[in-house]
Every structure is written in structure tokens, then in C-alpha cells.
Image: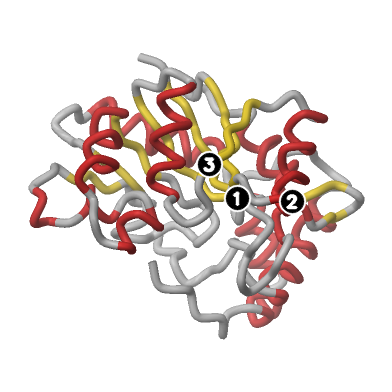
Amino acid sequence: MKIVAIIQARMGSTRLPGKVLKPVLNKPLLAYQIDQLKRTQLIDQLVIATTIESQDDLIEQFCQSNGLAYFRGSETDVLNRYEEAARKFNADVVVRLTSDCPLIDSTVVDSVIGHFFTNRAYDYVSNTIKRTFPRGMDTEVFTYELLKEAEQKATFEREREHVTPYMTNPKNGFAIGHWLGEQDYSHIRLTVDTVEDFQLVERIIKSLASEKDYFTLTDVLKLLNDHPEWTLINNHIEQKKD
């Protein structure tokens, strides 16, 4: 089965426009995320799914410059964008990722994928519904067939904009699996949605990049344990509602 990870990315973020290409040490955040994900053992192909809006020409150029597969589709109907991208690249299983996770740990991603394949009774598996991992490690896994069904049947705006609500709605009867960490770090924000989020992630990258070119979640948690005051930078930020 071909496992395709699809990262949704656009320049038009409401709270921090252009965040995906904001540089740290002269390298865009999206490039850090790509480098992190290249370490995965279970993903067969990585695809950037951006929009047809002119401002996202920059993301297409980034993909072309870095030899990355990409797809351009609707800005608002992200579910349709995902389905068309998955179909174009012949996905059997889709890993949904978002471009605001530059520190995502490939071992976390592989663990969620592994849980999906080990428990084939599940239609959908994630580490986001029952959250123990920090925001910024978000990974969702489902079959292309389920994605296709959602694209055909989902009617509510929230379902179209956020891709997976149709799949995770208990009324629709799909089997949902949860990947949980050994400890609860759900209070930590490693996602980038605001200026404060960027300031924290920038500080983490600058601290770790001098020693290594790949950052594990353990590395990040150790750093924050050594500098607990850093988490105060963005711990007041409220996550946007899906």
C-alpha cells in the first residue's frame, strides 16, 4: 500500500501571514518540517498541498526549488484539495499533516502510522483527538477510500475546511483509534500560529541547530525542561477551534 503524507500549506494564515516560509537561520520553517519528515521510515511520498491563489505561487516555487511533489487546489475546500492530491499521487493511505509543525518528530509520525496498520479494525488513527503530545506533533492517518467517501458526502463548512471532522464524527460510525504518549505534554505548544509561537520555535531551533540537523521530541522537551521560562512565551495562546 502506498502511504502518502500530505502537508496542507498556504501563505494566507489569518494570525501569522506567510508563516510557513518565515526563516530561521536563513531556512524557511517549511524546510525544517520537510527535513524532519524525511527521516520517517513508513512514508512513501511527501506532497505539499497548497492553493491556487497567487500568493501561494511562493510555495510552488519553494517546492520546485527543493524537488518536492506538490498539488494546488481550493483554498477553502481543503477536503477537496486533499482528495484530489491523494488521487493524483495514487495514495492508498493518507497521512494528514499541517505546515505549522516545523519541529514534528518523524518517530511520532511513524508511531501513529504503525498503530493504524497494527490495528486494521480502525478506519482512522490520530494523536490529536485524545491529546498527550504537544501541539506541533499532530498526525492523522486514514485510507484514501475513507477520504474519498468524506469528500463525496461531507456537506458542512467545517467538514470541508478541516478535512477530517466527517471521519471523526461518531454519528458516521467509523472506527477511531488513538495514539497516546507515555506522559501528557498536551499543554506545550510547538505549533506556529502566532508571533509568540514563532518566537518560541525560533529559540528552540537556534539552540539545537548548532549541535544537530534533526530534532527529536525528546531533544525539545529536554531543552524546555532546562529552560522552563521559555514555555511562558506562548502558553497563553488559545488554539483556534477546528
Residue in the foreground of this view, choosing between 193 and 156: 156
Residue 206, horizontal then vertical, whole percent: 84, 57
Res 40 seen here: yes
The answer to whether marks 2 and 1 mark residues whose Cβ atoms lie closer than 8 Å is: yes
Q: Disc 1 marks which amino acid? A: Ser
Q: Quadrant of the C terminus?
A: bottom left
Residue 61, horizontal then vertical, whole percent: 79, 37
In which quadrant of the rendered view does residue 224 lie? bottom right
Query: Considering only order in the chain, which callout, 3 or 1, is on the residue closer to the N terminus?
Result: 3
Residue in the foreground of this view, choosing between 71 and 144: 71
Query: Tag 2's secondary structure?
Result: helix
- Pick out the residue farthest to the top: 1
Mark nearest the camera among 1 and 3 is 3
Query: Tag 3's secondary structure?
Result: strand
Residue 193, horizontal then vertical, whole percent: 61, 68
Q: Residue at x 67, y 70 (%)?
A: 197
* Count of marks placed on residues: 3
Mark number, residue 99:
1
Q: How busy is the neighbourhood of tag 3: few (under 14 within 10 Å), some, or many (20 plus)?
A: some
Q: Is residue 3 left or right of residue 169?
A: right
Query: Considering only order in the chain, which callout, 1 or 2, is on the residue closer to the N terminus?
Result: 2
Q: CA distance from mark 2 to mark 1?
A: 8 Å
Q: Mark 2 = which residue?
A: 29
In which quadrant of the rendered view does residue 20 lie? bottom right
Does residue 144 sit above or below 228 in this rendering?
Answer: above
The answer to whether marks 2 and 3 mark residues whose Cβ atoms lie closer than 8 Å is: no
Q: Mark 3 = which residue?
A: 73
Q: Disc 2 marks which amino acid? A: Leu
